[in-house]
């Protein structure tokens, strides 16, 4: 991605970060704020043969090599699942193991990949004066892989720069965080986010990449609210075809035990909706504004003790939601528990 194609709030951050010195940068913030896009744009700018104050030129051999995922001086350290999804090549032996069905792609950053990244820093540069390691999402490093990277992160060999991007900085080892300059991702203004969201969906629709019709500002505002103001997450909601009326009526439907809207959604997405509803009910019950749903559509807030217990249950469920449970049984259990909690009226 070239700097010019970045969302405007990311472009502003890119220009600022390009002026910073230091070999290790940590982009930190909640999901949906564009950590990966900003990290890749910064890597492109650092490696570009003809960089501009706005970022990479987008036309040189280095930029092209990054576009086709073949740049010899860029190491993308990611979970294998994400690498395959985004087109980044895996180590030869790892790819062979997956191709031979010896194991499934890892959802964590494996220690073997971290060792490969360390070895990458010790080889001769191929094109320019810098080598870059992009780690995303950095919280997917386990203890072993993080410790493998630690010494190189502290004292890299030669001209090596690190970009770590995370949506859960608190999950990183303190020793990793302390060795990086931290940049807190900037939240865009609502008008800026809405303009970008409408443009992205309209462009996808015009290119035949999305079944979604050109959105109205009102529809885009619903997607943005459903995402808690996070633009990338809002774009995912837009891609799902989320209907504004269905979203507004969802809390009351769940209170009645009606799971129709959620029935075909992935378990992780269903759980995220329940967590958002729990958050809004706790906020509304405390006199604060709702964040994800229209306040008028919320059922009466249950007792705070019931909501607190439900919140803990949902957090516990989130730790194992990707396990291969029976989805039908899990959905029935969540529906029954949701209806039970929402029936617990305040005294």
Image: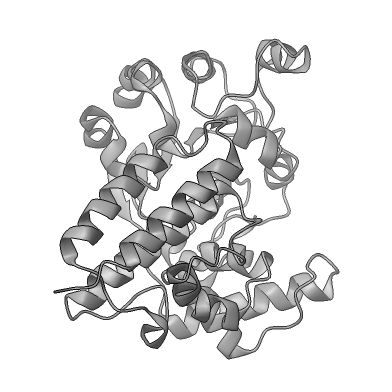
The quadrant holding residue 93 is top right
Q: Is residue 137 above or below residue 114?
A: below
- The image shows residue 164 at horizontal and vertical percentages of 41, 39
Q: Position of residue 196 (x, y in %)?
A: 58, 76
Which residue sits at x=75%, y=74%?
Answer: 212
**Image quadrant containing the N terminus:** bottom right
Counting labels gives 0
Is residue 54 in view from this perspective? Answer: no
Residue 303 appears left or right of 14: left
Q: Is residue 217 left or right of 271 when viewed as pictured? A: right
Colour theme: one colour
- The residue nearer to you, when weighing 26 against 128, is 26
Q: Is residue 3 visible?
A: yes
Check the image and name the residue furthest to the left: 347
The residue at the point 64 percent across, 58 percent down is: 2
Q: Is residue 281 left or right of residue 266?
A: left
* Residue 157 in which image quadrant: top left
Task: Give residue 169's position: percent from left, percent from top.
Answer: 30, 43
Q: Residue at x 72, y 39 (%)?
A: 65
Residue 64, above or below 5: above
In the image, residue 75 above or below residue 50 = above
- In the image, what residue occupies the spot 34% across and 26% down? 153
Viewport quadrant of the C terminus: bottom left
Apparent side of residue 104 relative to residue 7 in the rendered image (left or right): right
**Quarter residue 235 falls in:** bottom right
Residue nearer the viewer, 301 or 166: 301
Q: Residue furthest right?
A: 208
């Amino acid at each position: 991605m070239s700097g010019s194609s970045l969302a405007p709030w990311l472009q502003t951050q890119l220009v600022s970060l390009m002026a910073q010195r230091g070999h290790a940068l940590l982009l930190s913030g909640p999901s949906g704020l564009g950590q990966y896009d900003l990290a890749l744009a910064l890597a492109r700018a650092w490696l570009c043969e003809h960089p501009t104050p706005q970022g990479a030129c987008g036309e040189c051999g280095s930029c092209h090599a990054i576009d086709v995922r073949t740049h010899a001086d860029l190491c993308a350290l990611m979970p294998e699942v994400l690498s395959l999804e985004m087109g980044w090549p895996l180590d030869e032996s790892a790819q062979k193991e997956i191709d031979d069905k010896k194991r499934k792609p890892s959802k964590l950053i494996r220690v073997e990949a971290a060792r490969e990244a360390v070895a990458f820093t010790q080889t001769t540069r191929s094109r320019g004066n810098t080598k870059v390691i992009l780690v995303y999402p950095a919280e997917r490093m386990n203890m072993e892989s993080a410790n493998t990277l630690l010494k190189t992160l502290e004292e890299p060999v030669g001209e090596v720069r690190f970009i770590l991007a995370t949506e859960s900085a608190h999950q990183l080892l303190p020793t990793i965080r302390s060795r990086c300059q931290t940049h807190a991702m900037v939240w865009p203004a609502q008008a800026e986010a809405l303009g970008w969201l409408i443009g992205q969906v309209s462009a996808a629709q015009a290119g035949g990449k999305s079944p979604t019709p050109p959105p109205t500002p009102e529809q885009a505002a619903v997607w943005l609210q459903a995402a808690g103001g996070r633009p990338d997450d809002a774009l995912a909601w837009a891609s799902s075809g989320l209907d504004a009326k269905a979203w507004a009526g969802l809390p009351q439907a769940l209170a009645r035990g009606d799971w129709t809207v959620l029935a075909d959604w992935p378990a992780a997405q269903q759980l995220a909706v329940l967590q958002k509803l729990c958050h809004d009910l706790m906020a509304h019950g405390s006199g604060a504004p709702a964040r994800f749903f229209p306040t008028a559509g919320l059922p009466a807030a249950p007792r705070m003790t019931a909501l607190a217990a439900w919140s803990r249950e949902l957090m516990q469920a989130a730790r194992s939601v990707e396990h291969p449970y029976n989805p039908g049984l899990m959905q029935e259990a969540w529906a029954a528990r949701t209806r039970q909690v929402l029936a617990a009226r305040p005294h």
